[in-house]
Amino acid sequence: MWFRFPLLAVLAALPALAQISGSTGAPSYSSDSIVNAATQTVGALAPNTIATIYGTDLAFSTRAVTASDIGSVLPVELDGVRVWFNMQKCPLFYISPTQINFLIPYQASAGTASIIVSHDALAGFPVDIQVHDTSPGLFLWGDNQPLAVHLDGQLISGLSPALPGEIIVMYAGGLGQFGSTTLLHMQSGQLATAAFPIQLAPELQVLLNGIPCPPGSVLYAGTTPGFAGLYQINLRLPPDAPPNPEIQLVIGQDSSPGLIRLAIQSFLTGASRNGQPAGNVQLTRP
């Protein structure tokens, strides 16, 4: 089952670049002010990851992309603002004088990459970031809670906690490229048209209080149709899931930040949601 959130709203050449870099009023930022948009932490990013740049003089205006900007692909320029990744223009979600949300290109390779922000006739100095195959992170809301929903679409929270054994949907970033060979030439910023599992799905683990969920708990990890850079994880919680555990994603050597707690109710005999006993909820897949 797929759900839509207004995340996008929350969420030619470059002539004379060498001559204008560092000019008065040019964008100002650093490697340490570029973060994973899901976790808001500094560190390595990954292909198809939504990232945020914080700085000054990043743009002359403030606005998010709209439906008229997108079509089937995110724009690479908004009001004269561009973000360059190794001299490739990045898809954009949001611009303002102090913040830009953009997408790391899908074809990005692991290693060191150069980031430049430009607007109109001004450009900032290039800064380097590290790129890994994955940079897992759960999108957050409120008081450091993961963005997750019940199968009826209701947000999981302290007022509406998940139950042990329930199937939930969590929203994440930085899970890397997809396994389908049809996506080898995928255009960066393209909105996902279907459910494509991530390439490293067999390596994905969800930890609750540091303990991996049992094998087979991750029912799906991949694209969220209709979005770019947004992943979802359909997870069956263990029947003995602890209340309000710390939750982390791990893929290989990369993991999401700790200290994020998922609202899970203590298991009670006969506990149910929408009339279904805990653990017996059925997942609808397209």
Image: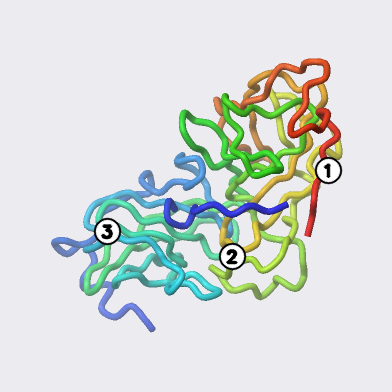
Quickly name the residue at label 2: 106
Quickly name the residue at label 1: 282
Q: Give the SS element for disc 1.
A: loop
Decide which of 81, 219 is in the foreground and name it: 219
Decide which of 36, 171 is in the foreground and name it: 171
User: In the image, which disc is placed on residue 58?
Assistant: 3
* Residue lying at 29% horizontally and 71% vertically, measured from the top left: 79
Label 2 CA crowd tier, 10 Å (few <14, some 14–19, many 20+): many
Answer whether labels 3 and 2 touch (C-beta < 8 Å): no
* Residue lying at 64% horizontally and 44% vertically, measured from the top left: 153
User: In the image, which disc is placed on residue 146?
Assistant: none
Real-space Cα separation, disc 1 to disc 2, in angstroms: 33 Å
The nearer-to-camera label among 1 and 2 is 1
Real-space Cα separation, disc 3 to disc 2, in angstroms: 23 Å
Q: Quick one: label 3 or label 2, which is nearer the N terminus? A: 3
The answer to whether residue 137 is left or right of residue 199 is left
The answer to whether residue 179 is left or right of residue 215 is left
Real-space Cα separation, disc 1 to disc 3, in angstroms: 47 Å
Q: Give the SS element for disc 2.
A: loop
Q: Quick one: label 1 or label 3, which is nearer the N terminus? A: 3
- Return the x and y of residue 9 as percentages of the image width and height: 42, 56
Label 1 CA crowd tier, 10 Å (few <14, some 14–19, many 20+): few
Name the amino acid type tagged 3.
Answer: Leu
The relative height of residue 244 versus residue 100 in the rendered view (above or below) is above
Name the amino acid type tagged 2.
Answer: Tyr
- Return the x and y of residue 33 as percentages of the image width and height: 36, 46
